[in-house]
Image (cartoon, rainbow, N blue to C red):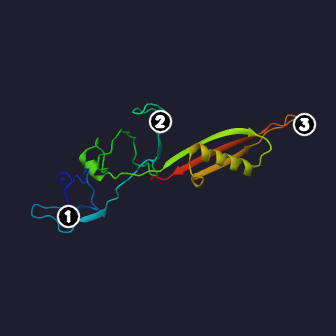
Amino acid sequence: SRTLIGTDVPAGTNINHIPAETTTHPFIVVYTRSTLVEQTTPISFVVEDKLSPVQNVSFPDFDLDATDLGGILYWEAPEDESQVEQYVVYMARLSENVSGCESMTSDFAAVMTPVVAETVISGSFSFSLEGATPVQVEAAVKSTLVKLLGVDSSKLTVTLTLVQTRRLARARRLASQWLVTYQVVIPAT
């Protein structure tokens, strides 16, 4: 099957603007037409529909009211930014049947697929401690984070960095400074 895009293009024009939101087909075909008949075998090519979704969206909500939001929305740029000119952010609500957004047009809601995302908790902190080995510090940090965050230890990744300290005198040495970064990935249920 085929669908006409716009109107007939006069000879000599050789371009046709395809507006945004045009429903896609696997191919675009171009026919020539005379006053008598339309060509039977068109020239065709495969459509390459660009998709550039942002990645790793996060929003830490710092507003403590149950029905209000406040904070900074973060995301990573799409892998292919060649066609991206700007980003547009909307508030949206999923419909009862989870097939689309109530605040969007019905055409958009018909093609929107709900996404089930994982939750990522990450952070960093530092502390001073003398006489502990990296194995001891990692075990203590993991145990503490598992208890504080209420997560399974298999979902927790911890990275330790021992920051070099300087000695003020032979007999006196500063405590070791530990930098800890952590990440917990909780799959959607």
Q: Residues within 10 Å of mark 3 (few under 14, many from 20)?
A: few
**Residue 188: image location, x then y, percent:** 45, 52
Q: Quadrant of residue 44?
A: bottom left
At 24% from the left and 52% from the top, the residue drawn is 16
In this orientation, does residue 171 appear?
yes
**Is 102 drawn above or below residue 45 in the view shown?**
above
* Foreground of the two, 138 or 161: 138
| Viewer-proximal residue among 142 and 178 | 142
Give residue 86's position: percent from left, percent from top.
40, 41
Q: Nearer the viewer, mark 1 or mark 3?
A: 3
Q: Residue type at mark 1?
A: Ser
At label 1, counting other C-alpha atoms closer than 10 Å, the crowd grade (few under 14, some 14-19, many 20 or more) is: few
Using residue 183 as the reference point, say whether residue 139 is left or right of it: right
Asked if 161 appears above or below 171 in the picture, the reply is below
Q: CA distance from mark 3 to mark 2?
A: 48 Å
What residue is at 79 percent from the left and 38 percent from the top? Answer: 175
Q: Which residue is mark 1?
A: 1
The local crowd at label 2, few if under 14, some if 14 to 19, many if 20 or more residues have their Cα within 10 Å, is few
Instruction: Name the N-terminal-most of marks 1 and 2.
Output: 1
In the picture of the structure, the residue carrying the numbered disc 2 is 61
- Name the residue located 10 percent from the left edge and 60 percent from the top edge: 35
Where residue 23 sits in the image (x, y, percent)?
A: 26, 54
